[in-house]
Amino acid sequence: METKKTHMLEKCLQKIPEVKDFPKPGIGFKDITPLVEDAECFRFMVDQLAAWAEEQGAEIVAGIESRGFLFGAAVAYKLGLGLAVVRKKGKLPRETVSVRAPNEYAVEYFEMHTDSVRSGQKVLIIDDLIATGSSSISAIDLVQKLGGDVVGFAAVVELAFLKGVEAIRSAHPDVEIKALIRFDE
């Protein structure tokens, strides 16, 4: 079983090309679209994330705009859970709570509807990628601001050389972190 998992992780890793100088010069963008276009890889990633979410006791999944929605929605569906959305400022129509969300490219704000998460509800946050960890930290802060209990933060890809997991652990030492594919450079 572990050999099959290792084989699938390697296959999925090979599906993620690096696009040089996108979205700006000097950035090597990891493009996950070929990963989700491959049915076997997409299913494998969703299954891995869902199994981990279930272990954490998640009661709702929160997906971060926009690629986090791809995996968050699929995991929530697989587990029979709801999906709360973390959006960029100005995208949600009802009353929201927001936090400052600096990332590698700009300073933005994340928002959620005030009723997206109940106080004490166990929330697993999913995004496509952990880079510097700043967006991840902001999403955790936002869910906690709503009273949610963040039981985990999951991503498909970790860019380990940017030390994002370490930054998340420093800011939120009680939050479990899971990344399926790791790039060391």
Image: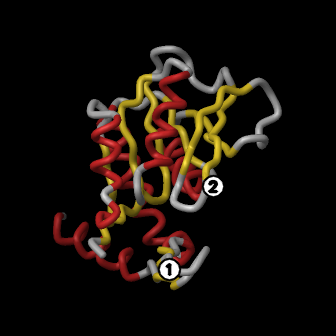
Helix, strand, or loop for circle 1?
A: loop
User: Is label 1 or label 2 in front?
Assistant: 1
Q: Amino acid at mark 1?
A: Gly
Name the residue beneath numbered marker 2: 66
Q: Residue shown at 63%/55% (left/top)?
A: 66
Looking at the image, is 126 positioned above or below residue 19?
above
Horizontal and vertical percent position of residue 106? 61, 56
Looking at the image, is 11 positioned above or below residue 172?
below
| Quarter the C terminus occupies | bottom left
Q: Residue shown at 44%/71% (left/top)?
A: 40
Crowding at label 2, few (<14), some or many (≥20) Cα neighbours within 10 Å?
some
* Quadrant housing residue 130: bottom left
Most extreme residue toward the right is 93
Horizontal and vertical percent position of residue 3? 17, 71
* Quadrant housing residue 56: top left
Colour basis: secondary structure
Name the residue beneath numbered marker 1: 26
Looking at the image, is 179 positioned above or below residue 122?
below
Q: Nearer the viewer, residue 127 or 54?
A: 127
Looking at the image, is 157 positioned above or below residue 151?
below
Most extreme residue toward the top is 119
Q: Nearer the viewer, residue 141 or 57?
A: 141
Mark 1–mark 2 distance (CA, rounded to whole Å): 22 Å
| Quarter the N terminus occupies | bottom left
Crowding at label 1, few (<14), some or many (≥20) Cα neighbours within 10 Å?
few
102 displayed left or right of 96: left
Q: Residue shown at 50%/76% (left/top)?
A: 27
